[in-house]
Image (cartoon, rainbow, N blue to C red):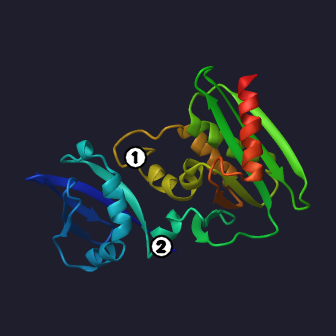
């Protein structure tokens, strides 16, 4: 799946619509976008326009996620579109998202079933609002189905970051293992490294809304830990009687209460 880099710039506002120029190293096109009605109107006919129309779902997702009050003349953003990316597949929580970083070439894609002979890291985090205490737990399952447990209390008071720390600690413990599956109930963890981080890095760690990405140093470390590895990200619904996820949830809560 080839990735293509573009620059978008908001040129002007006309009656609630924003004229946006999108360019690459070879060409440019323009469109009108209305943040209220979500209507897109392409203003030029060329190869770049055809490419954007073929991948309009990805373009729309970016524009739809941008807050209304962050549209203004002069706003600039770099972004990536993946040629013929099946967005529905990536959004299907029953599917496994793969990050293959073994050749230092960022590759992410979706599979229905993961590899059978693979180390597994089950993670969960807990933040207790009353005590303002947080912790995470992880279970590592090796190729012989043996379990290894780890729990850790943390100072941070952010649930997303706690979930991220759990996945990072699991990768640190399996630093010499090439193929790993991370099983998590966090979409923040599942999507961050496989989809979002590419655009964050292109924009010096700013989001589509012009805001600084949260927990940058941790995401940089997470990406570093993924180098030379094949990682599958499997999402499970929290509190759904999934055996290992339930264990991690219980261990994390108990550790946070200590």
Marked residue nearer the N-terminal end (1 or 2): 2
Residue 96 left/right relative to 75: right
x 77%, y 52%: residue: 243
Marker disc for residue 80: none
Residue on which the image places disc 2:
86
Quadrant in the picture for the C terminus: top right
Is residue 219 rendered to the left or right of residue 26? Answer: right
Against 241, residue 136 (above or below) is above
Cα–Cα gap, marks 1 and 2? 22 Å
Q: Residue at x 34, y 43 (%)?
A: 210
Instruction: Please identify the quarter of the rendering in which residue 30 is found.
Output: bottom left
Residue 147 image point, x, y percent: 88, 50
Label 2, secondary structure: give it. loop
**Going by the image, does 104 lie left or right of 82?**
right
Q: Residue at x 50, y 63 (%)?
A: 91
**Would residue 171 be seen by someone viewing this image from the given angle?**
no
Residues marked 1 and 2 touching at CB (< 8 Å): no
The location of residue 231, given as percent across then percent down, is: 69, 60
Mark 1 Cα within 10 Å, few/some/many (few <14, many 20+)? many
Direction top: furthest residue? 131
Q: Residues within 10 Å of mark 2 (few under 14, many from 20)?
A: some
Q: Closer to the camera, 136 or 194?
A: 136
Spot occupied by residue 11 in the image (x, y as percentages of width and height): 17, 54
Front one among 4 and 163 = 163
* Labels 1, 2: front one: 2
In the depicted structure, whether residue 190 falls above or below residue 40: above
Q: In the image, 164: left or right of 17?
A: right
Q: Is residue 20 above or below residue 221?
A: below
Residue 38 in which image quadrant? bottom left
SS at badge 1: loop
Q: Does the image show residue 258?
A: yes
Q: Which residue is mark 1?
A: 207
């Amino acid at each position: 799946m080839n990735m293509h880099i573009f620059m978008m710039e908001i040129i002007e506002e006309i009656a609630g619509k924003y004229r946006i120029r999108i360019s690459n190293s070879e060409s440019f096109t323009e469109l009108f976008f209305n943040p209220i009605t979500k209507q897109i109107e392409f203003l030029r006919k060329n190869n770049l326009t055809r490419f954007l129309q073929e991948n309009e779902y990805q373009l729309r997702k970016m524009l739809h996620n941008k807050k209304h009050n962050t549209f203004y003349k002069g706003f600039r953003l770099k972004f990536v579109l993946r040629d013929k990316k099946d967005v529905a597949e990536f959004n299907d929580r029953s599917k496994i998202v793969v990050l293959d970083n073994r050749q230092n070439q960022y590759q992410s894609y979706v599979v229905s079933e993961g590899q059978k002979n693979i180390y597994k890291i089950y993670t969960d985090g807990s933040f207790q609002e009353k005590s303002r205490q947080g912790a995470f737990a992880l279970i590592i399952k090796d190729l012989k189905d043996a379990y290894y447990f780890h729990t850790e209390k943390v100072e941070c008071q952010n649930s997303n970051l706690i979930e991220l720390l759990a996945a990072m600690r699991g990768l640190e413990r399996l630093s010499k293992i090439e193929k790993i599956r991370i099983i998590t109930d966090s979409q923040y963890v599942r999507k961050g490294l496989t989809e979002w981080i590419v655009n964050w890095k292109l924009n010096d760690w700013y989001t589509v809304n012009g805001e600084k990405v949260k927990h940058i140093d941790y995401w940089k470390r997470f990406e570093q830990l993924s180098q030379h590895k094949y990682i599958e990200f499997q999402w499970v619904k929290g509190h759904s009687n999934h055996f290992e996820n339930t264990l991690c949830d219980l261990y994390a809560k108990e550790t946070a209460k200590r």
